[in-house]
Amino acid sequence: MTSPQQPQPDPAANGTEAQPQPAPGTPPQAPAAPPMPPAAPAVPQAPPAQAAPPAPPAQQSAPEQPAPAAEAGTMMLQAQPAPAPAGEAGTMMLQAQPAPAPAGEAGTMMLQAQPQAPAPAQAPQPYAQAPAAPHAGPAPGAGYVSPIPASPTHLGHALASEWTKIRSVRSTIWTLGVMAVLVLGIGALVATAVSTNESIGATPPLFFGFFGMLLGILCVLPLGVLVVSSEYGTGMIRTTLTACPARGRVLAAKALVFFGLTFVVTTVVTGLVAIMDNALLGDLSRAEVTGAEWLKSTVGVSLYVSFLGLLALAVGSLIRHSAGAITIMIGVVLLPFVLSMFMLTDSLSDLRNFLLGYSIPNQITVMYGSKFPFVDGGPAGWEPLWIVMGIAALALGGAYAVMRQRDV
């Protein structure tokens, strides 16, 4: 196909002089061909990804057609492939390119269509993975079955746990170790000092173990407090109650383990002191040591000290603060005795005798078979043991009630 005839440039309009016209009868000469426009740079073709299929008939190159003799300056349009964007194959670009004109037809242009190379095959996109189907839960009525064999828990498990705790902490070794050193050391020193006398009168020889035990109590009380309050201070009580939600079982296990350990250690220490005092002072005393006095000076004193430690354990569970609970227990042991020493008026004599008679130091003296000479009234025999047992039971009951109602 050919383009329409282009108008000839007007010489006057271009400001050039008119060419001389040929004389009549002279054959016409072909006008000088105008300068050819520079060909447009060829667009690089994309390398085909595969063999190009045969072009359809519509894209066949058109045959060259000679321009009419009277139509000079005809242009030829040639379609060249252009790089098509991804997914747009078959895009054509028309480009004007001069074609060699036959004689007498200068500047003829021809429209030529060239097939577009197909766009490179795109890499297949991976399919989006379908979301996994939600895991179907267990069938109704079917629960999780652990491969680990499980057995119902009981008090023995709690006892084993508390025994592991109390024997693996340093506070147990330090407190009971210092208590044993004080009771044995002070008992031996006092017995050695008294043995230099010619006679000790009717005082039983086992009484002199009282001095070491009075200081030994001050070591047992902190241990009873720390058995509970240390877990509250470190937050370990949360783990303990998670493993054993039965809070009464936890408190009972702590009390039994502490009581058993304290009783055994105290019994061994008081037994050694009693044997030593009787060997050094037995000949100097007019009092005969009976089996009941031996039992009360060893086992009775050990039970009294152990129940006093249970009282400290209950106070630690109520207070949940180590320093505060230890301070309270030291006040319980020493404050009544110290206050009674300042009540010197006759109007306070009854209160003074009551505080002296039921103070912890005097009750320990009674357990050793004697009492303070300036005390009127007060407990006698095994009464101090029943008193401390009752107070410790009430304190433990209150600690259990509070522990059940209070959050950790």
Image (tube, rainbow, N blue to C red):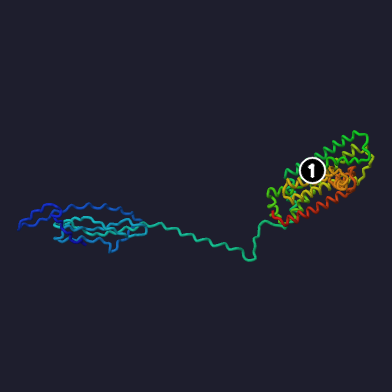
Residue 193 % position (x, y): 87, 34
Q: Position of residue 246 (x, y in %)?
A: 73, 57
Q: Residue furthest bottom?
A: 140
Residue at 27% of width from left, 53% of height from top?
Answer: 42
Q: In the picture, which quadrant includes the N terminus?
A: bottom left
Identify whether 178 is placed above or below 57.
above
Nearest the eye: 39 or 309: 309
Q: Secondary structure at mark 1?
A: helix
Left or right for 406, reference 393: left
Residue at 66% across / 58% down in the picture?
Answer: 146
In this orientation, which residue lies closer to the viewer: 294 or 15?
15
Q: Nearer the viewer, residue 119 or 408?
A: 408
How far from the left and from the top, in percent, is residue 138?
61, 63
Q: Residue at x 68, y 48 (%)?
A: 234
Give x and y (percent) for residue 46: 33, 54
Residue positioned most to the top: 196
**Quadrant of residue 63 within the rendered picture:** bottom left
In the visual, does 366 lie left or right of 37? right
State the residue position of label 1.
218
Residue at the extreme right? 286
Q: With 210 as the anchor, is 90 left or right in this view? A: left
Q: Is residue 126 above or below residue 274?
A: below
**Local crowd at mark 1 within 10 Å, few (<14), some, or many (≥20)?**
some
- The mark total stands at 1
Q: Quadrant of residue 174?
A: top right
Label 1 is placed on what type of residue? Leu
